[in-house]
Image (cartoon, rainbow, N blue to C red):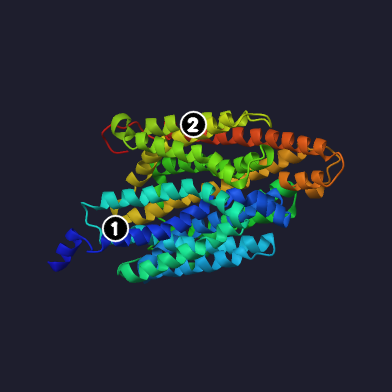
Amino acid sequence: MAATEDRAQGHPRRWLILVAICAALLVIVVDNTVLNVALPSIAAAFGASTAEQQAVVDAYVVVFAGLLIAAGAAADRYGRRRAMLAGLVLLGAASAAAAVAWSVWWLVAMRALMGVGAALVMPATLAVLMQVFPDRERPRALAVWAAVASVAMAAGPVLGGFLVAAWSWAGVFLINVPVVAAAVAAIVRLVPGSRDPHARPVDPLSAAMVTVGMVALTTAVIVMGEHGPTAPAVAIGFAAAAAALAVFARRQARSVAPMVDLSLYRDRRFAGGSAAVALLTVGTGSALFVLTQHLQLVLGYSPLEAGVGVMPLAAGTVLGSIAGGRAPERMGHRAPIVLGFTATAAGFVLLAALTPTSPYLLVAAGLLLAGCGTGFAGPAATSTVLGAVPTERAGMGSALNDTHQQFGIAMGVAVMGSLLAAVYRTGLPDAVPHRVAGSLAATLDYAAERAGGADTAAAARAAFTAAQTATMLTAAGCALAGAVIAGLVLRRDRPNGAG
């Protein structure tokens, strides 16, 4: 009886617990976007090619995505507070080590460790909120959680620009250390320990296989953009990805208590909604990677100005989410997804029109439209996917939904970055050496050291914007493909009904 009353009333310090949880969430979400503004500085410091910059970004996102499901199962089995504390400590230590990196590959390794830490933290935050808040207050708590995630995503580029201007690229990693320390102290003091006594056992081999498969796939795509499709590493990467993911699928199909219930993908709402969202994030995930370079290296913005310059994307996402939150009640679920994805595609088409002399207004308009479309479609897409998951498997469904989005972002950076690099090289003058043709930053440094380098720099900027046009049109195609999938696969539902 007492336990029932406790659940009905919630934990007496639940709102302070929410603050502690949000501090942990802040770190892992900011790390998704804070690095983009620092990429030109990292490229200059280490002579990093576009492929190496892709690796720095994707190391965090791919490992994060690959371990989310296993980390959620581990948190349920061994304790949510333990998982959060272990993840935060690992993330903080890896961030400090990244700040003193002596090579780009050390930076990649530390970003991967940060992804392991983030995967341990993310699922546990929601599980703790579900535990400490009663049913009547849970929507408000989840709204705060989502708002913090949105603000952190939006603030990442601006914070990154400020830190690069103040400290250099290392600042985007050093800032994690005091925030992690504060979050750890708050969690130790406030968050109660909890675990699921009936939690499924963790399958380390399955977790390793799905992560290896994702890493191998994105690596193969990145290498293909750098060295061409005939490079031996490309075939090895694709073969390793296929083998690892096949082993993972086989183990899940044969397991009595699988980490992933593959039967969910036979539901057209779950499969169609997940495919549409993954395609959209392939496009949106690459937007900041490309445009922060355009703002700094083509238009000449400082890192802080570039961070502020991409804010229309976040503003559009917030505005779109406000309208999209009520859209399923008025239009059903399919229509907002189709309309939102189409608007996002239109935003990418505007960005594809950029040239070296285009005004910033065109950048802002494209980002704002893309953000509005993504935000408008988001609530309907998420509720469609999770609405197809049985209540008792809600944790698994939520982890899969996050995995689809994170891996879509990683593939976006890999695919679009490789396309950007390939088209950029073909547009450069023949006199530019191959060793400096890997990124715009390297080419501009080469031009600055040579007499008459102004013409080379102008040609490099023109080649970059041409490559940017190709990537943005491809991103628009991905968003439109998502709209088509949603329109064809998802059934039309009543405006006030479920998906």
Q: Residue at x 65, y 42 (%)?
A: 296
Badge 1: few (under 14), some or many (20 or more) residues near its Cα, within 10 Å?
Answer: some
Decide if residue 166 is in sight here: yes
For label 2, the SS is: helix
Q: Quadrant of the N terminus?
A: bottom left
For label 1, the SS is: helix
Q: Position of residue 170 (x, y in %)?
A: 61, 59
- Front tag of 1 and 2: 2
The mark found on residue 130 in the picture is: 1
Work out which residue is located at the far left of the displayed protein and give it. 1
State whether residue 299 is above or below residue 170: above
In front: 224, or 156?
156
Decide if residue 206 is in sight here: no
Amino acid type, mark 1: Met
Q: Position of residue 25 (x, y in %)?
A: 42, 57
State whether residue 332 is above or below residue 411: above
Q: Is residue 480 left or right of residue 337?
A: right
Q: Is residue 405 left or right of residue 38?
A: left
Q: Position of residue 369 (x, y in %)?
A: 49, 31
Q: Residue at x 65, y 64 (%)?
A: 101
Please name the residue that numbered disc 2 is placed on. Answer: 369
Q: Position of residue 219 (x, y in %)?
A: 64, 54
Q: Is residue 320 left or right of residue 462?
A: left
N-terminal of the two: label 1 or label 2? 1
